[in-house]
Amino acid sequence: MAEYLRSLNAAQHQAVIHDPKCPLQILAGPGSGKTRVLTCRVAHLVQHHRIAPNRLCAVTFTNKAANEMRKRLNTLIGEKKTQMLVMGTFHAICARYLRKYGAVIRVKNNFSICDADESKKIITRLLKDHVAYIKKKDMKVEPRDVMTAISKAKAKGLDAVALAAEAETGTGEKGAGDEFKRVVAMIFKDYSAELRRTNSLDFDDLLVYGVKLFTAAPDVLRDCRHILVDEFQDTNTMQYELMLCFARGHKCISIVGDPDQSIYGWRSAEVENIAKMCRDFPGTQQIYLEENYRSTGSILAISLAIVSQDKARINKGLHTSHGSGPTPSLIGVTNEIGEAAFIAREIKRLKAYSGGMLKWGDFAILLRFNALSRAIEIALQQESIPNRMLAGHKYFDRREVKDIIAYLQLIDNPDFDSAFVRAINVPKRSIGAKSVLEIQTAASASGISPMQFVEKIYAGTAPDIKPPIKRKLATFVKPIQDLRKLAYQGCPVQDIIQSLLEKISYETHLQSEEEWESRWDNVQELINFAAETANVAAQSSDESLPNLTLRRPVDDEENAKDRKREGKGKGKAKEQGQMVTRVIAVDSDEEDEEVIEFTEETPLRIFLQAATLSTDTEIQEQDESAGKVTISTCHAAKGLEWPVVFIPAVEAGTFPSWRSDDIHEERRLLYVACTRAQALLYLTYCRARMTAGEMGSKMLSDFIHRALNKNKALLGLQPPSIKDKEREFLAQLLNRQLPNKILIEAMISECRQASRSRDGDDVEPMELSVFGAASSFVTTENSQPPAYSS
Ligand code: ATP
Ligand code: MG
């Protein structure tokens, strides 16, 4: 039997070998092996059905999931074949196609990806132009709300014109004359123009333009033979459209999903896509998997007690192949500081107790909001517990990292104004905000970008704004121009960054700041990230996207405008500022068409894409993640698993979040979080919590309260007292060897002594009554859990 078919149960096996021509839905609960089945199905299509790997498209929900699938496939079908697969998130896949073929729809292949932060800055600025109208209508409009509304419109495939029409005709929820929508449509129009002007796409655009490209040039997908999608319950309309594009030629689709885990409705995911697919692809077969391989029985029991509170939910069979294991704990504490301290110490204690069986990387703390992480990060730091933030924008949000990225973006795309504004005066060149504004105005009057304009000043082909500026620009323009040449020659990004740092004396610039060493370390980390990306890029072969000769129609209005703007060169590369455009447009024999040829990616572009896309979902890990406790939002933890999971703040207002108006989705989110745990699960809550600078009293989440009302035994009110046999069970469950018993005893007693000498004797938790459900609180000062018996 083939390697990939071993260790599958009967239903999983059936799903893997299912006829490729018959559309397939694998619907099943968490931990039932959906992702494993999808991975094995890719292997089966390649090995058994002999489909060339570059004809398969496998879509994952996060970059991390794609990397994991890649690793597994490396062992199942070999590295060479894995390299050729078209694999990644919908966003990353679209970005790749757009880089190569975007010219068909007039997307330049050096477009920058505008992250949420930059989008918000642009929208905040554009909003100011409409202040008078907003005032007149007596409205209060927040940039954040506009941004969400634009994103939702794009996710549904609406552009500014369609949204404006909706506002007038009343096809939206609020009926005709929806003033907010009117304002959004106006800003949407300006925002789109701004992105176009700065040669950038936001995250939603990657999908929108992906659909446009595949519609305008279906040929680019002509080789695709099968599309596979993980986490299908969380696809939005645009992603569904993309799936249709990929499946157009063959209708061979395999999707896996779980309606109980649909948690992205707030980002326009449509769980109805599951039913839609059955309608669009008659004959779609559904296979259900019922055995959970991830969690213990008691973790599954509390998880199901939460999710089954939704009366409209369709009940699915789900049982575990493991024993019931230690009861999950519900721990009440006085405030967030006590909660964080409890979690940190409990992690330390469990790790010591396991005597090496559990590593830091086996623990995860899953948060409803990123903002809850502050106290926890401090507590972990105090206890010297290494940790990493998944789905935090932490790393790429750091000022010094953003500075360097901005330079790299300008090297690649001189039209990207946000990068220009960020980099022009870093390090300080005495070019103040006023001068920057003057440059922007003059550039705009000449119809070029500010970067191109300063390049002209520097070259002496445009008048100096204020005579000293030209001199000040030397340390800005020259490094960028020199490095641009290197970038286009395919120079490794590590070398470009090294050289940039020297040319702009960035280390000296940082030295004038407090804690400059750690900032400098972060910059060095970027060099590691560049090396890492180069490795990953080398793993995905360019052969997977065919070299085609494509044509684009030239008769639409937008094209005509663009052609006028760019000037039309016959058969030769055109100069755009200092940069040679990489797409060469040539007139074809047909009067209404242009033929487009393609060039390959530069390493810098691949790097920038990885950096910008990873800020959306997760930070790329440099160091061995086994060495760090994970802090993550519940959303980003989707699809992942850890032996020990803590979920803080299971309180009303957090679960469900006060911000959300979809209580069912909030419940499912808690379900997703609980089902990440393999062996031990902790839910913690506070009596009072500091939120936005104010201390407020808190109550236990109603989701937990209801589950307990049904069965109090689902949760223990103290940390589990783990005995030898449970320890053995855990070792078995995690497939790990039990370490030497003597070693464990020594470590436990050391750990106990250390904490006693710091905190005094262990304390008994006090009994309190919350919502009528008996619950125990550990006070802040005495957040020490009771000692384990061994
Ligand atoms: P989620 O809904 O959370 O994404 P999933 O259904 O995708 O979960 P997987 O992540 O594929 O589940 O599998 C969960 C765990 O169970 C993994 O560690 C996987 O290796 C393991 N597993 C799946 N099937 C089997 C099997 N037949 N035998 C042993 N282990 C299995
Ligand atoms: Mg999965």
Image (cartoon, rainbow, N blue to C red):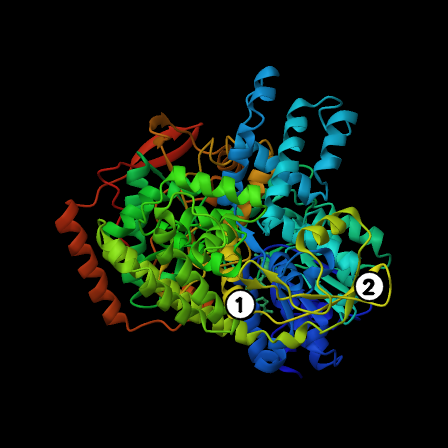
Disc 1 marks a residue whose amino acid type is Glu
Question: Quarter of the image containing the N terminus?
Answer: bottom right
Residue name at image x 16 percent, y 45 percent: 759
Q: Residue 146's x, y, as percent?
A: 58, 33
Label 2 Cα crowd, 10 Å radius (few <14 / some 14-19 / many 20+): many
Residue name at image x 43 percent, y 55 percent: 458
Give the CA separation, mark 2 to mark 1: 27 Å
**Quarter of the image where ligand 2 sits:** bottom right
User: Could you say whether the residue bearing mark 2 is in a helix, strand or loop?
Assistant: loop
Q: Quadrant of residue 764?
A: top left
> On the rendered structure, is 19 left or right of 36?
right
Residue found at the very far left of the displayed protein: 757
Q: Quadrant of residue 435?
A: top left
Task: Compare residues 673 and 573 and report the one nearer the observer.
Answer: 573
- The residue to which callout 1 is attached is 68
Q: Residue 189's x, y, as percent?
A: 66, 37
Residue 325, compared with residue 339, is above or below; it is below
Residue 790 visible? The answer is: no
User: Could you say whether the residue bearing mark 1 is in a helix, strand or loop?
Assistant: helix
Question: Quarter of the image containing the C terminus?
Answer: bottom left
Residue 742, compared with residue 334, is above or below; it is below
Disc 2 marks a residue whose amino acid type is Lys
Residue name at image x 39 percent, y 65 percent: 497
- The residue to which callout 2 is attached is 251
Q: Earlier in the sequence, mark 2 or mark 1?
A: 1
Residue 170, compared with residue 618, is above or below; it is above
